[in-house]
Amino acid sequence: MLEADLHVHSLFSACGLHTLLELLEHGHAIGLKAMAVTDHGPGVGEGRLTSVFFERFRSPFPEIKLYKGLELNVMPERGTVDVVWQFMPFIDILLMGVHPNLPTGQSTGYYTDLTLAALDNYPFIDIVTHPNDGTYPLDYRRLAQSAKRFGMAIELNNSKVLYHRSTAEEAVELIHACKEARCLMAMNSDTHALLELGADDAVRPLLEKAGFPLERLVNRSADAASRFIESRRELKRAAVRSRKK
């Protein structure tokens, strides 16, 4: 099980089933030490993001470090993502992935070019989510090289393999691309239903068998996750300051 799960959806995403308190309560029960709530940005046309969560919510479970984040969406307009700037001063971690707001059936080059253009324009993104989703194929080597350049992490997504939306072979190919590029990785549950929280059983054996260096796994422990998040916080602050000028 993960100590720090950095990709969790609540009811604030249309695809999430549980409240923040349900997630925190269950995380406490299973011994989770850190959790990032990363609901979808508005680009997928779903959910109900609220400033109350970002500006005012305080967890009643001090044993679990709560990080406030978003999972942004690569947009069809080249080089853009759906950043919600009003929340940025309160954001701890930003994820970004390809989602159904983009058309299906396009080439690997199409999805990869859009993703890399977005990373170029938003270098304060921390983790690229589920690149091994076969519906939106990405060039793993190009992606890993870009992540290495920006100090971002590439996600190994437990749910994609667990629910057979990606094969183990595709996940291993992604791991090897990251290993070759010497980029960082994050292993996350992508929780939408409660019992998925903290789960890594579908992908941890693949990571270990591939020999990926654990020191490059940003959430290998809660302390490591904290160091990664804090090391990238100034990038977000600088983006907010630049936008105000």
Image: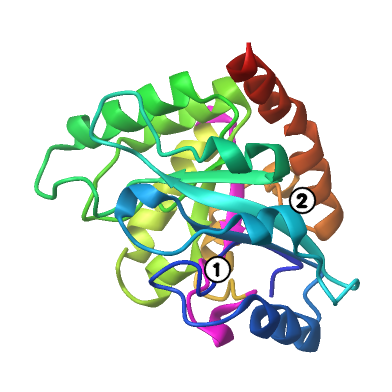
Q: Image quadrant of residue 53?
A: bottom right
Label 1 SS: loop
- Picture disc at residue 130: none
Relative to 168, say whether 41 is above or below. above
Q: Residue furthest left?
A: 105
Q: Where is residue 216 drawn, in percent x and y?
A: 69, 41
Q: Is residue 141 left or right of residue 53?
A: left
Q: Image quadrant of residue 168?
A: bottom left
Looking at the image, can residue 142 be seen?
A: no
Q: Amino acid at mark 2?
A: Ala
- Picture disc at residue 189: 1
Relative to 115, say whether 133 is above or below. below
Give the camera-side residue of 166 and 99: 99
Name which of mark 2 and mark 1 comes first in the sequence.
1
Q: Amino acid at mark 1?
A: Ser
Q: Quadrant of the C terminus?
A: top right
Q: Where is residue 6 drawn, in percent x and y?
A: 64, 58
Q: Is residue 97 magenta?
A: no
Residue visible at 62% across and 54% down in the picture: 51
Dot 1: few (<14), some (14–19), or many (≥20) neighbours within 10 Å?
A: many
Q: Where is residue 86 drawn, in percent x and y?
A: 59, 39
- Count the marks: how many? 2
Q: Is residue 184 magenta?
A: yes
Residue visible at 61% across and 77% down in the picture: 197
Dot 2: few (<14), some (14–19), or many (≥20) neighbours within 10 Å?
A: many
Q: Image quadrant of residue 34?
A: bottom right
Looking at the image, can residue 8 be seen?
A: yes
Give the extent of the magenta segment: 181-198
Residue visible at 41% across and 56% down in the picture: 171
Label 2 SS: helix
Task: Name the residue that disc number 2 marks.
Answer: 225
